[in-house]
Image (tube, grey):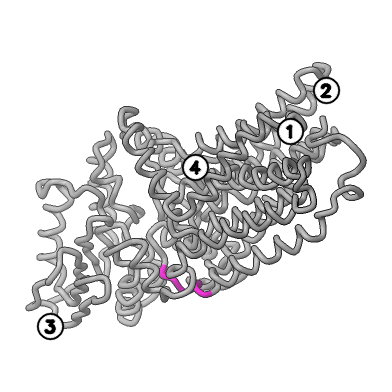
Amino acid sequence: MTIGPPGPPRASRDPYRSGAWVVVLLALLFAGVVRARLLSVPFERDEGEYAYAGQLILQGIPPYRMVYNMKLPGTYAAYAVVMAIFGQTVRGVHLGLLVVNAAAIVLVFLLGRRLFGSFAGAAAAAGYALLSLSQTVLGVFAHATHFVILPALAGLLLLLKGIDSGRLRTLFGSGVLLGLAFLMKQHGILLVIFGLLYFAWERRRASWRRFVVEGGLLAVGAALPLALTCLILAASGVFGNFWFWTFHYATAYVAEVPLAVLPIYLPAAFAMITATTMLIWDLAGLGLLALFLREELRDARAFVVGFLVFSFLAVCPGFYFRPHYFILLLPAVALLAGLAVDALRRLLSETSLARAATTIPALLFLAVCAVTIHEEARFFFHETPLEASRATYGPSPFPEAVEIAKYIRERTAESDRIAILGSEPEIFFYAGRKSATGYIYMYGLTEKQNYAAIMQQQAIREIEASAPAYLVFANVFSSWGPRPDKGTPIFDWYEKYVADHFELTGLVDIVSQDETDYVWGRDAAGRAPRSNYYLYVYRRKSPS
């Protein structure tokens, strides 16, 4: 199978090849400048989790021993690699994201070029650069979805090459890369399934022997990353925890939201994530139409439509539709937007405007990019990293976590443990101190799922056994989710435990978007918070 119009090798008949690379380089430059300006934006809590887990990996501590979470360990390992290269800092992690995103932009171009030619590929790359940078999908934060996209795109590009060439090692490599995408986050399994189904579709007329050999290597490659991970975790003695959290608890988690919410949650989420980039999404819609109207694009239909459908399905598990989940859909959208621009070029070349067939689509796409950039100009060019954090996440205590961690770090030894009642694992990373419990998120303890009561008791036992030097309580909605009843056991325990063993030494009061009160030492005991978003910092009482 050959995707794209038939004819001589593309290198000899693609007049846009060199110019396309210029566009890609400009897209990389723009995205790099914006990301570099915001390298210091404080971690949000998912980044804090990945960074803390990566920090532990670099200390020789495997995932799921001191960090309990339902996420697969690929992103933990990716963070460890990034921090080993660029440093264990916020800037280091975000510099790693800059590199990962730049590689994804190039892969979108290469995929678009293979499917539709360099003109479309260049527009797709520029479109993806803007879409993946957008504040509406939390694009400057190093979420796991960015780390899913990179191996997934590389795997799909190899898949197309392997199908064309029939080279077994190429198909095996494609499977390995798709398997790595799944290892970064469970949502990636949909892209693995797409790769396998697309291979089966393309090889449906092949001999059974060829189908089995090639398909078997592709499937073995896809399974290999998870299989090796299971062996490593088993050798580390944490396989039981890994299996419970990533499969048993994850299953309970995705079952919490009923299907009935889909017509409500999805349109609301879509409106939010397209608020500033709608013109690119409109182009994608036109590209989808062109895909079926232009006969020369027939060979690409199965891949593009399949990629779009399975990318959308990858957003859907659990029906949570969080903004950064939509990053998984952006490469397919960008490819369709690039196709729309190229389809207009092809259409004009068949009319009396043939001389302007390149100029008009290029200027149109440039205008779309300009409007999109203008929509987010404040975020891209003007907000400081602290302002960007607050503008994106509201009163979540992400800037405050830096100061809290600094206060604790300066008053503790490396061997001391700290406890956080709330979901702010970034504090552990900043402080360089280990958690008193593996429950670095409190969400699971108060969710309406069968394991919640057991989790609360386990967290209580671990905290008491660790005797933390400091304890932080976060009275912030986003740190708990829907606030449980005061009668929830862990809250009753917290009030008694603090009264018996700790004294208040810090009040961090998030008064407004621009003002946070920090009160330390004895002054904290007599100060009442002015807002509904505050954190208490407690120090263990000296033995009497």
Q: Is residue 408 left or right of residue 543?
A: right
Q: CA distance from mark 4 to mark 2?
A: 36 Å
**Placement of the C terminus among the 4 image quadrants:** bottom left
Which mark, residue 210?
2
Q: Earlier in the sequence, mark 2 or mark 3?
A: 2
Q: Which residue is mark 1?
A: 297
Mark 3: few/some/many CA within 10 Å (<14, 14-19, 20+): few
**3 vs 4, front mark:** 3
User: Quick check: 74 above or below 195?
Assistant: below
Residue on which disc 3 sits: 523
Q: Quadrant of residue 301?
A: top right
Residue 311 sits above or below residue 405 on the image: above
Q: Which quadrant does the N terminus fall into?
A: top right
Residue type highlighted by circle 1 = Leu
Task: Please report whichever mark, 3 or 1, sits nearer to the chain's N-terminal start.
Answer: 1
Give the answer, above or below, for where 367 lies relative to 178. below
Q: Secondary structure at mark 1?
A: helix
**Corner quadrant of residue 521:** bottom left
Residue 398 vs residue 251, the one in the foreground:
398
- SS at circle 3: helix
Q: Is residue 403 magenta?
A: no
| Local secondary structure at mark 2 | helix
Q: Which x, y percent locates residue 152?
A: 63, 44
Q: Amino acid at mark 2?
A: Arg
Nearest to the observer: residue 47 or residue 29: 29
Q: Is residue 130 above or below residue 202?
A: below
